[in-house]
Image (cartoon, rainbow, N blue to C red):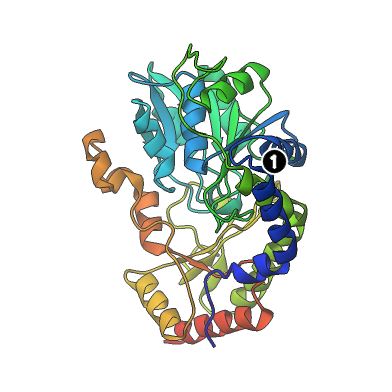
Amino acid sequence: MNVSLLDLKPQNGALEAELRGAFDRVLRSGHFILGPEVEKFERALAEFTGAKYALGISSGTDAILLALMALGIGPGDEVLCPTFTFFATAGCVARVGATPVLVEACPVCFNLDLADAQRKITAQTRAILPVHLFGQAADMDGVLALAARNHLRVIEDAAQAMGATYRDRQVGTLGDFGTFSFFPTKNLGALGDAGALVTNNAALYERAKIMRMHGMDPKYHHAVIGGNFRLDALQAALLAVKLPHFNGYTEARRRNAALYAERLAALPGVAMARAEDCGCVNAGASGREARLVLPIAYPHNGHIWNQYTLRVVGAGRREALRAHLTAKGIGSEIYYPVPLHEQVCFAHLGYQPEDFPVAHRLAGEVISLPIYPELPRDHLETVCDAIGEFLKK
C-alpha cells in the first residue's frame, strides 16, 4: 500500500462544484486582483481569527515582508527569530536590510527558546518574530513580556498555524501583526500562492493596506515605498469556499495525531516528549533517552497539527527510518534538515553549528509523517506498522 505524505485531491474534489462555481463567478466578473472577492474573504478571515483587520496578501512570505516594512524595520535594526524554521522567516528580515538574530529551539515544541532570545537583545533589537512551528503556538506570554520589557515589536509567523490557539486566543492576533500562508499544503490551502496579514491596530492596518499596492494613496501618488503584495480575486474566492470547512479539517488532523500517539506510544523504545524537558537537549522519558520521541500539544495550546513531527534518536537512525518508510511506499519529509545558522547565505552572521546545539540536533532527528485530514485510517495503521517493524531491527 502506498501512503502519500499529502494528497490534496480528496479535499478539493469534495468541493469541486463549489470551487468551480467560485471560478466561474470570478471569470464572469472580470475583476481578477483585489476587489469584492478579496474584501469578502478578508471579512470572513477577520471574523474567524478574531482579529479586527485582515488583509489578503500574495503569499505568506510577502505577508512577513509587508509586516516588517509597515513597522519601519530596516538597515541597522536587528530582529530576533528562530534558527529552526523555514527560510522565509529570516529571509524576509534580511530582505528589508535588517539583521536576523537567530535564536535556539525548544526540543519539545520546536519553537524559539525565550531564554536565548533574552540573551541576544541589544540596543539595535527592534522586533521579535516567533514562529508557531508545525501548528503549535510559541510561548506568547513570554514573547509579549519580553517585547514589553525591551520595547520590541512582535510579528507572529503563523504560516503553519492558522486556527491554532494560545490560551484560547487565536495565534496571529496577539502581536502587532500576524502572518498566514495559504500555500496549497497548509491547513487552509489555496490553489496557488496566497497569504494574509492580520492586526488589531487600525493605524498599522491602514499603513499595510497602502503598502500592499506600492505605497500608493491616492492613485499614482506615493508617500511611502511599498510593494506588489496583492491577492488575486480567484484565490480569495476559492479560499472562501474552503474556510467554512476548516474546523472539520482541524478535527480530522487532531484525530489522526491522537491515533498516532496511541499506536506509536505502545511500541518499545518510544516515548512522548515531556513539557518539563523544555530547554533540555536530551528530551526523553523516565530519565533515559527513547529511540523515538513523539510530539505533544501543551495543555494551554490548541495544536492544529500542520505536521506530525517525530524525533528519531541516534546517529543515522532518522535516515534509516526514512529509507525504511520509502521502501514501504510511505511518504515522509524532513522539516528542516539545515537550520538557518548553517545556511550558506547567512554565513556572514558568524554562527557555528555548536552555537545552537538543540537546533543542530533537531535537524538531524526530525521526520514528519502523513497527517492530512483525509488520510484513511488503514493508511495511518500502515505507517504505524512500518515504524513498529523498524524498531525491531
Which residue corresponds to the image point at 63% horizontal and 39% vertical from the top-left?
31
Decide if residue 209 is in sight here. yes
Q: Position of residue 378 (x, y in %)?
A: 65, 84
As drawn, 372 above or below 149:
below
| Residue designated by label 1 | 37
Q: How many marks?
A: 1
Q: Residue 200's quadrant in the figure?
A: top right
Between 26 and 101, which is closer to the camera in this rendering? 26
Crowding near pointer 1: few (<14 within 10 Å), some, many (20+)? many
User: Quick one: quadrant of the N terminus?
Assistant: bottom right
> Does 74 sit left or right of 34 as displayed?
left
Between 50 and 188, which is closer to the camera in this rendering? 188
Between 243 and 219, which is closer to the camera in this rendering? 219
Q: Position of residue 242 (x, y in %)?
A: 71, 55
Label 1: which secondary element: helix
Task: Identify which amino acid the numbered label 1 is placed on.
Answer: Glu
User: Quick one: quadrant of the C terminus?
Assistant: bottom left
Q: Position of residue 157 (x, y in %)?
A: 54, 39
Which residue corresponds to the image point at 65% horizontal and 49% vertical from the top-left?
27
Q: Position of residue 377 (x, y in %)?
A: 68, 79
Which residue corresponds to the image point at 48% horizontal and 46% vertical from the top-left?
279
As drawn, 171 above or below 264:
above
Decide if residue 114 is in sight here. no
Q: Residue 198's quadrant in the figure?
A: top right
As drawn, 56 above or below 288:
above
